[in-house]
Image: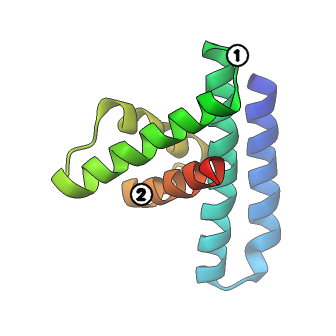
């Protein structure tokens, strides 16, 4: 599991280095998309650590993330579960704000659900 996270972090570093020639907005979008992919993989890794990961388990976790984000949008309160996922995103890229981390989680969960 640690090897996968290290590989994902190296992949993120490589992507960020090659994206340096793009405009700041393009770089931000690229970074968020890359982090979303890393987070989607981390969700799979965390699912595998707790049980045998199946497509349904991944989809259930992605749906939980989306439900918590919807609750946050309505009442402004971040659940403990959503806070842990935001911290997971920030562990990949500490420069992301909470809102950017939520955007990453939306992209990651949508990629799992679709």
Residue ID at (69%, 58%): 34
Vertical position of residue 30 compared to residue 54: above or below: below
Q: Is residue 68 left or right of residue 63?
A: left
Residue ID at (80%, 46%): 10
| Res. 52 mark | 1
Residue ID at (81%, 50%): 11
Question: Which element type, helix, strand or loop, lies under badge 2?
Answer: loop
Residue 86 shows in this picture: no
Q: Nearer the viewer's eye, disc 2 or disc 1?
A: 1
For this rendering, which residue is in front, 107 or 85?
107
Vertical position of residue 43 compared to residue 47: above or below: below
| Sequence-wise first label, 2 or 1 | 1
**Residue 93's x, y, as percent?**
58, 50
Q: How is the image coloured?
A: rainbow
Q: Is residue 91 left or right of residue 97?
A: right
**Residue 26's x, y, as percent?**
65, 80
Q: Callout 1 environment at 10 Å: few (<14), some (14 to 19), or many (20+)?
A: few
**Residue 49's x, y, as percent?**
66, 16
Report the number of numbered marks: 2
| Res. 97 mark | 2
Picture quarter containing residue 42? top right
For this rendering, which residue is in front, 112 or 44?
112
**Residue 8's x, y, as percent?**
76, 42
Residue placed farthest to the front in the image?
Answer: 56
Vertical position of residue 76 compared to residue 87: above or below: below
For this rendering, which residue is in front, 87 or 33?
33
Picture quarter containing residue 31? bottom right
Between the C-alphas of marks 2 and 1, the distance is 32 Å
Screen quadrant of the C terminus: bottom right
Question: Which element type, helix, strand or loop, lies under badge 1?
Answer: loop
For this rendering, which residue is in front, 109 or 22?
109
Screen quadrant of the N terminus: top right
């Amino acid at each position: 599991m640690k090897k996968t996270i290290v590989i994902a972090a190296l992949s993120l570093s490589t992507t960020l280095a090659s994206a340096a020639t793009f405009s700041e907005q393009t770089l931000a979008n690229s970074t968020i998309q890359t982090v979303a992919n890393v987070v989607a993989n981390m969700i799979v890794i965390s699912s595998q650590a707790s049980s045998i990961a199946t497509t349904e388990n991944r989809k259930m976790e992605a749906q939980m993330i989306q439900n918590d984000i919807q609750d946050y949008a309505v009442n402004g309160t971040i659940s403990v579960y959503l806070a842990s996922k935001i911290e997971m995103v920030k562990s990949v890229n500490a420069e992301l704000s909470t809102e950017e981390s939520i955007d990453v989680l939306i992209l990651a969960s949508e990629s799992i659900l679709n």
